[in-house]
Amino acid sequence: MEYRQRNDKLVLGALEKCDLPELGIFNLVMRVDTGAATSSLHVENVEEYEKNDESWINFDIHPDVYDVEILTRHSCKVEAKRRVKSSTATRERRFVIETLLVIGDQSWPIKMTLTDRSEMTYMMLLGREAMSERVLVDPSKEFLVTA
């Protein structure tokens, strides 16, 4: 199904595919969740370090969800550290990074938290803050956006 735009906003379903090109991730199925404030991405082996008096992190990502044996190492500047309540109601401190999100022919920078989502079905969750002023969601549909 071809995606639609209403009022200059992209219409997304409950599940969509996206790219995170700055992290080397393409064709990633993400959960679109208006109940979550922040977006989150599954990462492993997070290590914080200082660079030019700023906080940076190294972390591993599985860029291909269909081949979890592949891991890539990335470095990003830490935008913030946030206390986040997870879906299991536990609070944890997470690193926040900024990266480019691409959905269909649209792209914009988003902030996302990094966490262990290995027990979750989807490696990425797109939250309200990343959708604000840009997106409408039809939760009864999936994969409305085609590239």
Image (cartoon, helix red, strand yellow):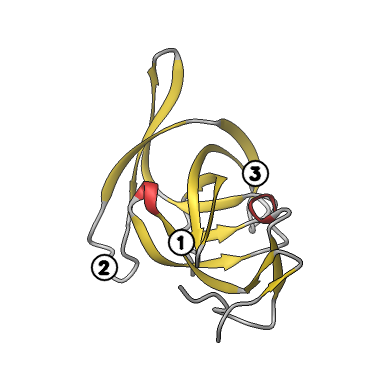
Give the Cα separation between the discs numbered 3 and 1.
Answer: 17 Å
Of 119 and 41, the residue lying toward us: 41
Q: Looking at the picture, does residue 125 appear above or below residue 130?
A: below
Residue furthest to the right = 7
- The amino acid type of the residue labelled 2 equals Asp
Residue 22's spot in the image, x, y percent? 38, 46
- Numbered disc in front, either 2 or 3: 2
Left or right of 65, for residue 79: right
Structural crowding at the residue carrying mark 3, measured as other residues with C-alpha within 10 Å and reported as few (<14), some (14–19) or many (≥20): some
Give the Cα separation between the discs numbered 2 and 3.
Answer: 29 Å
Residue 67's disc is 2
Structural crowding at the residue carrying mark 2, measured as other residues with C-alpha within 10 Å and reported as few (<14), some (14–19) or many (≥20): few
Residue 115's spot in the image, x, y percent? 49, 48
Residue furthest to the top = 53
Give the Cα separation between the discs numbered 1 and 2.
Answer: 13 Å
- The amino acid type of the residue labelled 1 equals Met
Residue at 62% x, 74% y is: 14
- Name which of mark 2 and mark 3 comes first in the sequence: 2
- Name which of mark 3 and mark 1 comes first in the sequence: 3
Residue 40's disc is none
- Numbered disc in front, either 3 or 1: 1
Of 113 and 18, the residue lying toward us: 18
Quadrant for residue 51, please give it: top left
Residue 74's spot in the image, x, y percent? 32, 41
Element carrying mark 2: loop
Quadrant for residue 65, please give it: bottom left
Element carrying mark 3: strand
Left or right of 22, for residue 100: right
Q: Give the residue at mark 1.
A: 123
- The amino acid type of the residue labelled 3 equals Val
Q: Give the residue at mark 3.
A: 84
- Name which of mark 1 and mark 2 comes first in the sequence: 2
